[in-house]
Image: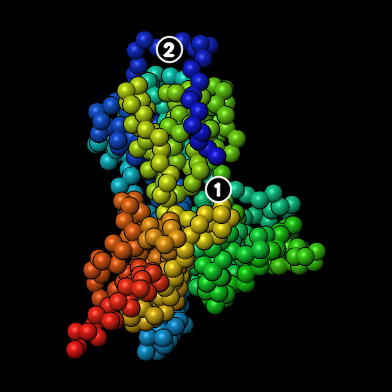
Amino acid sequence: MASTDQEPAAVSRDWTRPKRFDRNLIVIGGGSAGLVSAYIAAAAKAKVTLVEANAMGGDCLNFGCVPSKALIKSARIVHQMRHADRYGLEPVEPTVPFSAVMERVHRVIADIAPHDSVERYRALGVDVLQGYAKLIDPWTVEIALNDGASLRLTTRAIIIATGAQPVVPPIPGIEAVGYLTSDTMWERLRDRAQAPRRLVVLGGGPIGCELAQAFARLGSEVTQIEMAPRLMMREDEDAARLVEASLKADGVTVLTDHKAVACGVEAGEKWIDVDHAGERRRIAFDDMIAAVGRAPRLKGFGLEELGIKVDRVVETNAYLQTLHPNILAAGDVAGPYQFTHVAAHQAWFATINALFGDLKRFKVDYSLIPWATFTDPEVARVGLSEAEARQKNIPHEVTRYGIDDLDRAIADGADRGFVKVLTVPGKDRILGATIVGEHAADLLAEFVFAMKHGHGLGKVLGTIHIYPTLAEANKMVAGQWRRNHINAVLLSLLERFQTWRRG
């Protein structure tokens, strides 16, 4: 775990604390956690410096959420054109000018970039410096600016928000054959006239599944390799099965329970060997994407020199403080979740504790973390999954509604998937919800809100939902729960009452 309830140790006397400070707060990293931290600090009238070496907006804007969703949208349009007969239209095999698709991806990034720009944050009152930061002592940060200059600043508090980077699996030969990651693919594929002809995707998690499906729809012959027994191991098996079936329908060759063991080049052709149940198989490819996860950026910031533990993440307590109470961490570098919205969530706690922790501190709240995988169908979840409830022996009931029964889903040709809700036995209190289907991530918000404010399925059922909408699925599952909990004695009494009323 990234966080503990333990108090941070007193700052070591090996360093001399300044009598005056240049800044109230220095934030290292201009991704989601860093931007939100700087924004809050400036709004609180603190003197704050934000240090970012590369592009503002971090991984989400430049390499992750934004470009991948732009690519997925283009791939979805291609898919709909190819299957237009499902909507009573003539299907067509579209020409995919891949360079134009990638140019749109970069245009989307550029359109969103002003939200996270240096100019915007300076206008908000943030001192933005572009360069590399290193902690010299618990209150001093040295910044090597990108223009070659350097400076040192003292600060009362520091927030480490350096994000994460792709993990490259240690497969023999992988450097020789070359590989793409979510960080490099957007530039390296930008000018390709066509999508990679034969593409290997390493990894069966959210990033791997999203990219495998998108590239298959854009014309690549995709082979997805996952060493686990199935895709999307963090989700319930019924959800993962629907995604795997969809990927296969799009032409992806899904190889689960396959371990990549070696890569190489023979006669100018790249290959990768995989092992399955002791049998070795060779797969030829043109490009390969490593999508096996992301690891926090921990090195080069001076953390270890200050005694701050950095194993898989920066070790913090429940208040996001490190060994030194005035040095905090937020976002991917702190764990335990690698989501943009969680990074922003942590940023509030880290900033308030950094600026006002001497007066009052707040423990970061992980009790309600929603997430989604943007495959087609989407998978969205909040709270307990069915598998987790069983593993932890948590008493629960499962109520399920099939979206294939929903009027709007049928009209839209999106009648696949389900809504599954876990509740306390005999009660409507929601323990968790999983939605698989079109716009699942958007539909999940109602359950997140209900759980946040202690509303049960009865409240969802009693809320008017517009007809016909996909959101009615949430009301339908609540109605199914109600039908499952009808009081048989009361129903019998009602029947007798109605009989008496007829005379």
Q: Name the spot of residue 445 as percent of width and height, x first.
A: 34, 59
Secondary structure of the residue carrying tag 1 is strand
Judge left or right: residue 33 versus residue 460. Answer: right
Residue 489 in the image, given as x and y percentages of width and height:
35, 73
Q: Mark 1 = which residue? A: 294
Which residue type carries mark 2? Arg
Q: Identify which amino acid the numbered label 1 is placed on.
A: Arg
Cα separation between marks 1 and 2 = 36 Å
Circle nearer the N terminus (1, 2): 2
Mark 2 nearby-residue class (10 Å; few <14, some 14–19, many ≥20) = some
Residue 378 locus on image (x, y percent): 44, 66
For residue 17, the mark is 2
The residue that appears at 27% across and 78% down in the rendered structure is 494
Q: Quadrant of residue 85?
A: bottom left
Percent of width and height locating residue 188? 53, 56
Helix, strand or loop at label 2? It is loop
Q: Is there any visible trace of residue 75 in the rendered image?
A: no
Q: Which mark is residue 329?
A: none
How many numbered marks appear?
A: 2
- 462 left or right of 274? left
Residue extending furthest toward the right: 278
Classify residue 272 by image quadrant. bottom right
Q: Is residue 412 above or below residue 397?
A: below
For the N terminus, give its image quadrant.
top right
Please report the residue visible at 25 percent of the width from the left and 30 percent of the height from the top.
44
Quadrant housing residue 269: bottom right
Q: Nearer the viewer, residue 491 or 212?
A: 491
Residue 89 position (above or below residue 485) = below
Vertical position of residue 364 compared to residue 434: above or below: above
